[in-house]
Image: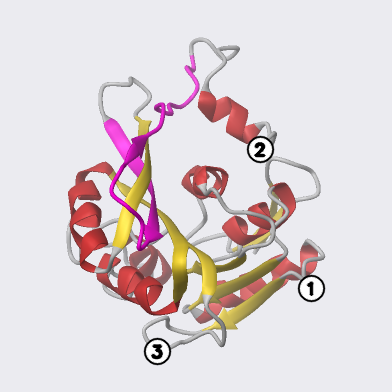
Amino acid sequence: MSFDRIIRNDICISQPDKGFRFGLDSCILAWFASVKRKDALLEIGAGSGVVSVLLAKLKGVRKIISVELQEGLYSHLLETVELNGLKQVIAPIHADIRGYKPNVLIDFIIANPPYRKSKSGFISEDAAKRSARFDDDLSLEDIFAFAFKNLRFGGKLAFSGVAERLTDALAVSRKYNLEPKRLQLLYSSDRKGGKLFFLENVYGGKAGLKILPPLWPPDKNNPDETCPYNLILQGDWS
């Protein structure tokens, strides 16, 4: 296992040396979410806990349920919560959301789900990597069905995905009365095409989608360039 500090020195994440490790898309998703401090928040597929910890540390969310299915990642989630002194804020739950029901309605659900459809592209021999990348264990339909049952009316769902699956996300959104309200794209380093999307939906919301300014990685040939991606990693999320 490794202990990795991100964005600020007081944020430390426990994760495996080998197998699935979080990416910067998790940081962007946490930054993107328009969650409020008072919201009761639930993270689906919390992994090692990076999104939940960032929301607690950088956005001041005070009540978080972090649900993780994989036993190995769940053990890292427990360690991460302990390392960051957040046992009174984050409640880790070892469960499959397809059979789990929280005892209260949730204000905000966040998920960084597997990006790829089942059996598409390279299939890793590592079980944790397969589960994190392919939607056999957690599909978009699963996420929206869970949100539909457990969000309060007016509650929000924020999640990310690969750009080519944006139409899938938009199609399933209205099936579950979760209106798309905010969309942001992360572009590739050459800015020629969208790479990832970040989408926020409102349960029972009125039609009207706001498309936010694009994000892109820093230019390696010009490291001093000011870009939105750099601002996220500087940790000023106010």
The residue under label 3 is which amino acid type? Answer: Gly
Disc 2 to disc 3, C-alpha distance: 34 Å
Q: Which residues are magenta?
A: 194-220
Q: Is residue 213 magenta?
A: yes
Q: Which mark is residue 99?
A: 3
| SS type, badge 1 | loop
Q: Is residue 96 above or below residue 136?
A: below
| Residue 124 in sight from this viewpoint | yes
Taking depth in this image into account, of 214 and 16 the one nearest to the observer is: 214
Residue tagged by mark 1? 88
Using a 10 Å C-alpha cutoff, classify the residue at mark 3 as few (fewer than 14 neighbours), some (14 to 19) or many (20 or more): few
Disc 2 to disc 1, C-alpha distance: 22 Å
Q: Residue at x 18, y 49 (%)?
A: 167
Q: Is residue 90 above or below residue 36?
A: below
Q: Residue at x 47, y 45 (%)?
A: 25
Q: Quadrant of residue 127?
A: bottom left
Residue tagged by mark 2? 237
Would residue 36 appear left or right of 46 to someone viewing this image? right
Would residue 165 appear left or right of 50 to someone viewing this image? left
N-terminal label among 2 and 1: 1
Would residue 87 appear left or right of 204 to someone viewing this image? right
Q: Quadrant of the C terminus?
A: top right
N-terminal label among 3 and 1: 1
The residue under label 2 is which amino acid type? Answer: Trp
Using a 10 Å C-alpha cutoff, classify the residue at mark 1 as few (fewer than 14 neighbours), some (14 to 19) or many (20 or more): few
Q: Quadrant of residue 131?
A: bottom left
